[in-house]
Image (cartoon, rainbow, N blue to C red):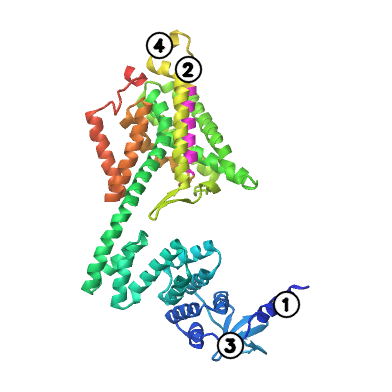
């Protein structure tokens, strides 16, 4: 069967299943000939009828299948047409047909309206989704919501519908209905309720204004717990990212005394390694597991780059901090330009695996994103692994020995030059892990590391140079401080306040939170 005959057969099936009946002629006329507001009102009126054929009409309108011929409104599919009001077949097709155009606003209204028809579904999940979608619906759908409330027994869906109805009555109802709606909204835990009550709190009517202010205080009191918990989670999340970014620097600067201005670019290399590994997995059925390959790859690639830098440049600059700073800053520019040459100057896209998408709805105004949760546990895992390596392995023993007394370690046979390379590679590899984590929460571009190098140094210096525990505490303290100050004064002033605090703190306590030990002290 050819495509034309197939379309004709489908159209014939559609019209045969469309029994003759009459929709509200006034609503249909407004939908076809009215202006934007008239069409919105007509959509609500058609939905309020609750007739499944009204849904077919609205779908035809959204899909560009609604046409007019004189005063008649037609649903046209291929070469067949129906009268939109009566459902009667129209033949032959009129030659003076004109399209009824639906803009984005009207398509959105139709989408909400079509979703509202699912309030009568037997499936609870469909009804719940429809109730949630009606939160921003037009007040013309209020009759349909009231009709659904008469039959709905599920408490969660009833609660959503009652709040939606109260919001609609608050906007367009008479005074008594608006006062009743405000009292009903006072029991809400939905954050969007605050917006409705704030509008009512500035109403010209004194009674409505006073009632809205009382309800607003009640709602804000219930939402306050979620806001504080959200702020605490944001602080832990930022602290875990700062910890990942600073852990590598805690080795290269804290233990080895090297001011590595290219540390941010090692983070950037880890992020781009994640992007490359993602590309290899994209065509396979195991795409959601690409991080299993990206994590070790980011560690190895960044570690190898760091070891190459130590062997070729940094090894000759130990004990000369100014020269080290200038050399590593130049290296950072070289790495940035190399990445721009290979991958381009634009940001690249790194997608979250399925298990890191979405979040957990803990409270009505608190959603914990999965990607942030995973990164927090990932940072803890990296911290534990780093502690175990430094405290329980021969390499860790060598690093601590060289850090505490390089001359004595050299005398007892420790290969100090090789340990320097391994330690620098370890710090660089951890920076790569930070880049892998950062690729899951932000943009990946050549300048990615520039945003974290200063924060990384702040964490290490504030916590105490050479102290792993101090790095952990400093990352969490700075994470909480940033988020708390941002909620009061904005991101820019929060950053300034943190910098000023660090300056005064270091003046009073130059060794940081914990006492300084290691090669830097010997120097």
Q: Is residue 307 above or below residue 84?
A: above
CA separation in Å, label 4 and label 3 = 98 Å
Residue 267 visible to an observer of this rendering: no
Q: Report how far apart the C-alphas of labels 2 and 4 lie in the structure.
A: 12 Å
Give x and y (percent) for residue 159: 41, 64
Q: Is residue 516 magenta?
A: no
**Which of pointers 4 and 3 lies earlier in the amino acid sequence?**
3
Answer yes or no: do the residues labelled 4 and 3 have beta carbons within 8 Å? no
Q: Is residue 415 left or right of residue 363?
A: right
Give the residue number, with chain letter if any, for mark 4: 407
Mark 2 vs mark 1: in front:
1
Which residue is tagged 1?
A: 9
Q: Quadrant of residue 474?
A: top left
Question: Which quadrant holds the C terminus?
Answer: top left
| Few, some or many residues within 10 Å of mark 1 (<14, 14–19, 20+) | few
**Residue with the most extreme top position:** 411
- N-terminal-most mark, 2 or 4: 4
- The picture places residue 506, in percent across and down from the top left corner, at 26, 31
Please, what secondary structure does the residue beneath circle 1 have?
helix
Dominant secondary structure, magenta: helix
- Which one is in front, 384 or 246? 384
Q: Dot 4 surroundings within 10 Å: few (below 14), some, or many (20 or more)?
A: few
Q: CA distance from mark 1 to mark 3?
A: 22 Å
Q: Secondary structure at mark 3?
A: loop
Disc 2 and disc 1: Cα gap in Å? 81 Å
Residue 170 vs 91, above or below: the answer is above
Whole-angstrom CA distance, mark 2 to mark 3, is 90 Å
Q: Report the span colored magenta.
A: 422-439
Give the residue number, with chain letter if any, for mark 3.
86
Q: Which mark is residue 417?
A: 2
Residue at 38% across / 55% down in the picture?
A: 365
Residue at the (45%, 22%) spot, across then down: 390
């Amino acid at each position: 069967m050819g495509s034309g005959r197939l379309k004709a057969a489908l159209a014939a099936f559609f019209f045969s299943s469309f029994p003759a009946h009459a929709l509200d002629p006034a609503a249909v006329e407004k939908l076809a000939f009215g202006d934007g507001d008239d069409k919105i009102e007509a959509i609500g009126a058609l939905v309020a009828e609750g007739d499944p054929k009204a849904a077919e009409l609205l779908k035809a309108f959204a899909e560009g299948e609604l046409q007019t011929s004189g005063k008649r409104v037609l649903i046209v599919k291929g070469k067949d047409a129906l009268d939109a009001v009566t459902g009667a077949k129209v033949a032959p097709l009129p030659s003076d047909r004109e399209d009824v155009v639906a803009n984005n606003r009207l398509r959105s209204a139709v989408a909400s309206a079509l979703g509202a028809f699912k309030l009568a579904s037997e499936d609870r999940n469909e009804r719940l989704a429809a109730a949630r979608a009606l939160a921003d619906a037009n007040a013309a759908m209020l009759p349909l919501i009231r009709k659904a409330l008469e039959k709905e027994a599920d408490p969660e869906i009833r609660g959503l519908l009652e709040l939606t109805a109260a919001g609609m009555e608050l906007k367009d109802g008479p005074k008594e209905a608006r006062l009743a709606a405000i009292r009903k909204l006072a029991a809400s835990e939905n954050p969007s309720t605050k917006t409705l009550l704030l509008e009512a709190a500035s109403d010209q009517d004194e009674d409505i204004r006073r009632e809205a202010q009382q309800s607003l205080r009640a709602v804000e009191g219930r939402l306050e717990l979620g806001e504080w918990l959200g702020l605490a989670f944001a602080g832990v999340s930022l602290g875990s990212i700062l910890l990942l970014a600073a852990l590598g620097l805690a080795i290269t600067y804290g233990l080895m005394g090297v001011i590595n201005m290219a540390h941010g670019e090692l983070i950037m290399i880890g992020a781009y390694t994640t992007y490359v590994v993602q590309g290899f997995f994209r065509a396979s059925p195991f795409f959601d597991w690409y991080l299993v390959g990206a994590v070790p790859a980011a560690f190895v690639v960044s570690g190898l780059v760091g070891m190459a830098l130590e062997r070729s440049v940094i090894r000759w600059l130990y004990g000369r901090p100014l020269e080290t700073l200038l050399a590593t800053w130049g290296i950072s520019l070289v790495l940035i330009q190399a990445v721009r040459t290979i991958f381009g100057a634009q940001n690249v896209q790194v997608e979250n695996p399925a298990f890191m998408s979405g979040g957990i709805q803990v409270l009505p105004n608190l959603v914990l994103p999965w990607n942030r949760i995973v990164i927090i546990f990932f940072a803890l895992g990296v911290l534990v692994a780093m502690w175990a390596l430094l405290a329980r392995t021969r390499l860790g023993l060598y690093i601590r020995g060289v850090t505490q007394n390089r001359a004595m370690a050299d005398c007892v046979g420790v290969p100090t030059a090789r340990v320097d390379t391994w330690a620098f590679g370890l710090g660089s590899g951890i920076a790569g892990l930070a880049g892998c984590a950062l690729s899951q929460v932000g943009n990946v571009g050549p300048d990615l590391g520039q945003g974290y190098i200063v924060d990384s140094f702040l964490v290490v210096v504030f916590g105490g140079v050479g102290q792993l525990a101090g790095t952990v505490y400093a990352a969490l303290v700075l994470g909480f401080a940033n988020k708390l100050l941002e909620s009061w004064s904005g991101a820019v002033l929060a950053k300034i306040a943190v910098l000023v605090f660090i300056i005064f703190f270091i003046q009073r306590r130059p060794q940081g939170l914990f006492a300084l030990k290691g090669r830097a002290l010997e120097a």
